[in-house]
Image: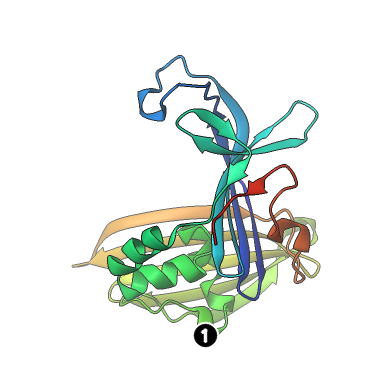
Amino acid sequence: MGGIIVFNKNDSYFEIAFDVPVINAKQFVPFLGSKTKFKPGGGVILSKDDETFSFLFELNEDGTRKYFAQTIWGKSSKVKTQSEKDAEIIEKYSNPYQKLFRDYNFGNADLYQALLPILPPSQIIATPNTPIYNFVGSGNLDGGLTFEDFYGEKNNFHSAIRYYFSGDKMIKIATFNYLKEENRVQFYEKHVIDIEEFLTTADENYLKLPANLQDVTKR
């Protein structure tokens, strides 16, 4: 799974790559069958000026993108922000932790957890099982790479995170988590996140609607 995450103050852009179903007109989404065709593409959540847009994109053979909103009748070039009614329902049935995850999980909980040791305290979601990470060591690897290791534990939850660097650029993060109770490992998981590019300045081109999409929100 690939993706792009862009932050600039309160504005954000989350993109996750996946195969997008090719929906024809009058083909109702819940009745998708095994014969449904798919194209490379993905989904986007754009939050700007306290408004949120959701839309999809397909990758053309030449590498360009076609952005669209999906409706039960097919594709549309018209998008709307989340309605006030929807926002009220989400807020009503969300607990404080869910709200924090919506605001700070970078669109992916695994990525958020992988970045915990280097996040500022104001962006850390302190759940009952969130470890306090400490730096435990660094070293050199073959190929000129270096690494830094962090470890944390809380309430029998253990977590180790290694950051890989090529020069001053972070290129990969590996995480290993496990839950141990009564001297037995009850659960474990491992994730490896490859970083194609890590920039400290936001690309403003991501923080606006694509040119072919029309905002039809009634304000």
Which corner quadrant of the image does residue 14 belong to? bottom right
Label 1 sits on residue: 121
* 215 is higher (above) or lower (below) than 160: above
Residue situated furthest top in the rendering: 35
At x 41%, y 17%, the residue is 34
The percent position of residue 58, horizontal first and vertical second, equals 65, 33
Amino acid type, residue under disc 1 in the picture: Pro
Which corner quadrant of the image does residue 40 belong to? top right
Q: Nearer the viewer, residue 198 or 97?
A: 97
The percent position of residue 117, horizontal first and vertical second, equals 54, 76
| 86 displayed left or right of 22 | left
At x 56%, y 81%, the residue is 135
Q: Nearer the viewer, residue 129 or 80?
A: 80
| 28 displayed left or right of 65 | left
At x 46%, y 21%, the residue is 26
The percent position of residue 103, horizontal first and vertical second, equals 49, 70
The percent position of residue 193, horizontal first and vertical second, equals 59, 54
* 109 is higher (above) or lower (below) than 61: below
| 44 displayed left or right of 96 | right
Residue situated furthest front in the rendering: 218
Residue situated furthest bottom in the rendering: 121
| 62 displayed left or right of 73 | right
Label 1 crowding class (10 Å Cα cut-off): few <14, some 14-19, many 20+? few
At x 28%, y 76%, the residue is 155
Q: Nearer the viewer, residue 82 or 96?
A: 82
Q: Quadrant of the N terminus?
A: top right
**Which color mode does the image show?**
rainbow
Say which element carries label 1. helix
